[in-house]
Image: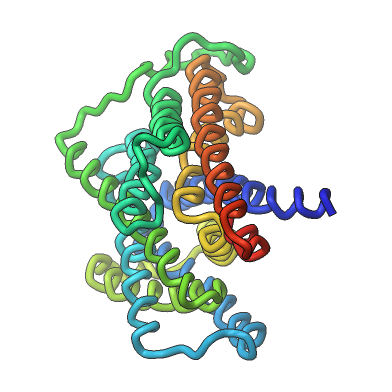
Amino acid sequence: MKMKSCLLESAPFAAMVAVELLDVGLSTLSKAAMSKGMSHFVFVVYSNALASMILLPAAFFFTRKKRPPITLPLLCKFFFLSIAGITVMQNCIFTGVSYSSPTLGSALANLIPAFTFLLAVIFRMEKLELRSTKSQIKILGTLVSIAGALVITLYKGPAILSPPAQPHSEPSPPTVLTTTSNNWIIGGLFIATACFSLSANIIGQAAILKGYPSEITLVSFYCLFGTIQCALVALIAERNTNAWKLSPDIELVSVVYSAIFGGVATFSVMAWCIQRKGPVFVAMFKPLSIAIAAFFGFIFLGETLYIGSVVGAAIIVTGFYGVIWAQSKECNDKVTKTSTTPLLEGLC
């Protein structure tokens, strides 16, 4: 029984780590596809459309006897949820990176835990008691994790491990974030908007799942409405008809990967974890993807591992552990103060 309880408790943690691993793969493939000229507007439409084709039949067959009835107000909530989490977030992040750089995108993505925590406090999903040690640790842990991710993004420092030297190799990249374009501010605004939209989406999912506990139904309509909205945006923004042609190479691979792993798997797992652990728990994993990308780049791509990556990863883990510890203590306190222990254990 103890082993089973331990596995159930660690499942959301393992699931969110897997989500960040999949997200790193998605970033790599999407960048490769767009470097060949694929329109990001078209990419978003195709990937969400394929995800909808997979999710909708699954939602119909597997949840038709268990899910609550679908009402018009609920469909409206799904519609607005998709605006924040798909239409605004995905299009803004790609547009922002095109104006600035992937480095700035990675740096500003660390705003997501802060935005989510702030919105959770505003909508009373998180209790902020400044005199409480657990609340203080949670706030400090969030800020520390963001700081660690910024260290990895903006500071490299001396190299620890390097691949074999190549003839006529280019000098190492600068150790700080630089830009030569006036579009940097515009790109930053787009990326910040995408981060806030994702945080709002996470909070919205948490609110909807309290009254409608069917994750796969939520995700299915979420993707469907997102596909329709993104298609309308793409028809306006992408006037070149040739951009809609999908090449059977990295473009097709990236769309399929994005639909299955970036859409079906990621959206479903995130909704499941939001319902069980809350929005702040899910958002806290975002800085972890930067550390994963740094170490994967060294292991699989032969990139140089800098001390900034190691130090930043250690800072992220420290802050992340603080938040998880504080949250687990809060859940234990709830279990102690109530007689409905099994229900609360499922939520915490």
The percent coordinates of residue 170 (x first, y second) are 44, 16
215, above or below 274, in the image: below
> Which quadrant of the structure image shows residue 343?
bottom right
The percent coordinates of residue 59 (x first, y second) are 59, 81
Residue under the image location 52 percent in, 14 percent down: 307
**Can residue 163 be seen?**
yes
Q: Residue furthest top?
A: 158
Locate residue 103 relative to residue 54 in the image: left or right.
left
* Residue nearest the viewer, comparing 309 with 14: 14
Q: Residue furthest left?
A: 182
Colour theme? rainbow
Residue under the image location 37 percent in, 70 percent down: 82
Q: Quadrant of the C terminus?
A: bottom right
The percent coordinates of residue 197 (x first, y second) are 31, 57
> Which quadrant of the structure image shows residue 144?
top left
The percent coordinates of residue 206 (x first, y second) are 44, 64
Residue under the image location 24 percent in, 28 percent down: 179
> Which quadrant of the structure image shows residue 85?
bottom left
Q: Quadrant of the N terminus?
A: bottom right
106, above or below 202, in the image: above
* Residue nearest the viewer, comparing 33 with 268: 268
Residue under the image location 60 percent in, 47 percent down: 332
* Residue nearest the viewer, comparing 147 with 28: 147
Locate residue 333 relative to residue 144 in the image: left or right.
right
How many dots with numbers? 0
**Can residue 248 be seen?**
no
